[in-house]
Image: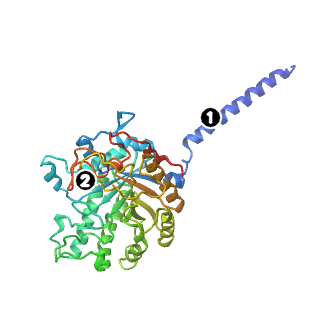
Amino acid sequence: MTKDPDIHISQAFRFAFMLLIAGLFFQCKRKEIGTPTVPTEKDLFVRGVDLSYTSQIEDHGGIFKQYNKNVDPYSLLKTKGANMVRLRLWHNPEWIKDIYGEQTKVYSGLAEVTKDIQRAKRQKLEVLLDFHYSDTWADPAHQEIPKAWRQISSLKVLKDSIYQYTFKTLDALDKQDLLPEMVQLGNEINHGFLYSKRPSSFPNLSLSDGQWSPFGEVMNSAIQAVRDIERQSQRKIKIALHIADPNGIAWWFEKATTEGKVTDFDIIGFSYYHIWHTEIPFKELGTTIKKSKERFQKEVMILETAYPFTTQNNDTYPNLYYRQDPVEGYDYTIAGQKAFMSELLKESYKAGASGVFYWAPEWISSSLRDLWGEGSSWENCALFDFNGEATDAINYLNTPL
């Protein structure tokens, strides 16, 4: 039988073509079902925002806009680059009803915070839950004992109380698949916690009085509650300890880890506001971060910061940033605000920090009321202008690292 060479060439061509198609198919399948891309340090760097005020602002007339259209600040901040939301939790803030009336929501109580966590999770934002361990604001000057705990006179009972509260809070969230990825145990605890207006019989946890040992015992009980939830849920929860001033990191964490024997935590957290934390210039902040990370072998994060875009007011509530001098090179303008925050992100990452949180970027003027006024003492530090319109400063969140 005579063999036609054209037939063989055609068959060879078809065979090669089939191999090419098959190769492309399996290559696509490998991309589809293969090992996921491992996130880089830049991917994991936390670009955080504290949105604890959002629902209260919205409930009292505040409107957020972009291009003059109403927007959800959670969604908008996510699209701009935010990847984690910080939410404060008060033990039992019933005082809010004294301001608004009995029918109001109890903002920053567990029920409302649960809704806020759901809102964040819907946007695929991770969550940092900030336990204040107080019924109201906790900061370096105020660490008021929750009303429910004021009759405690035994350190053992206090340790059990903080354990049970921390565990039950996280357990309730776990049952709803709402566990935070990170928790902060105490807020700006420079001088300890649970000591303001302390009854004489209540255990003394004031670090100003040198009470590192009892402070450490109580803190370790809270930490144990988180670790027990981790085992129950089989999910990792990072623990942050938070002080207000970067200048205090070396002293505070040395004392906490040695005299207090508090070692089972993941993150050294601090606040940085240039008008209050003046001992370390802005240009030297990166050095402090680097040294802290190397000395204590922990992650380091800026858990609160902000910068104003004006010194003007939009309501009668006096602003916290008003006439103080700006950081050199960063005017109090939208451009200056964006430049400052972009530089802070870049320099913090370069120094080895794991993230930076902007505090209250959404606290615009509204009929919101708190213990000190109505409106906002922070509207000139928001990432929205006095009409509620998102400004260009919000784009600092997508600063390349």
Residue 93 to residue 141: above or below: above
At x 22%, y 66%, the residue is 144
265 displayed left or right of 141: right
398 displayed left or right of 378: right
Residue 227 in percent (x, y) is at: 36, 64
Of the numbered discs 2 and 1, the one sitting upstream in the chain is: 1
Question: Residue 94: in sight, yes or no?
Answer: no
Task: Determine whether the residue tagged by mark 2 lies in a helix, strand or loop.
Answer: loop
Residue 282 in percent (x, y) is at: 47, 62
Residue picked out by circle 2: 108
| Residue furthest out toward the left | 102
At x 28%, y 69%, the residue is 193
> Can you tell which quarter of the image residue 185 is in?
bottom left
Residue picked out by circle 1: 25
Name the amino acid type tagged 2. Answer: Ser
Report, in whole angstroms, how far the alpha carbon at label 2 lies from the one at label 1.
52 Å
Pointers 2 and 1 in contact (CB under 8 A)?
no
| Residue furthest out toward the right | 2
> Can you tell which quarter of the image residue 321 is in?
bottom left
Residue closest to the eye, 2 or 99: 99
Residue 82 to residue 69: above or below: below
Residue 168 in percent (x, y) is at: 26, 59
Residue closest to the eye, 247 or 337: 337
Residue closest to the eye, 17 or 226: 226
137 displayed left or right of 268: left
Mark 1 Cα within 10 Å, few/some/many (few <14, many 20+)? few
Name the amino acid type tagged 1. Answer: Phe
Residue 10 in percent (x, y) is at: 78, 23
Question: Residue 335: in sight, yes or no?
Answer: yes
Task: Determine whether the residue tagged by mark 1 lies in a helix, strand or loop.
Answer: helix
At x 41%, y 52%, the residue is 48
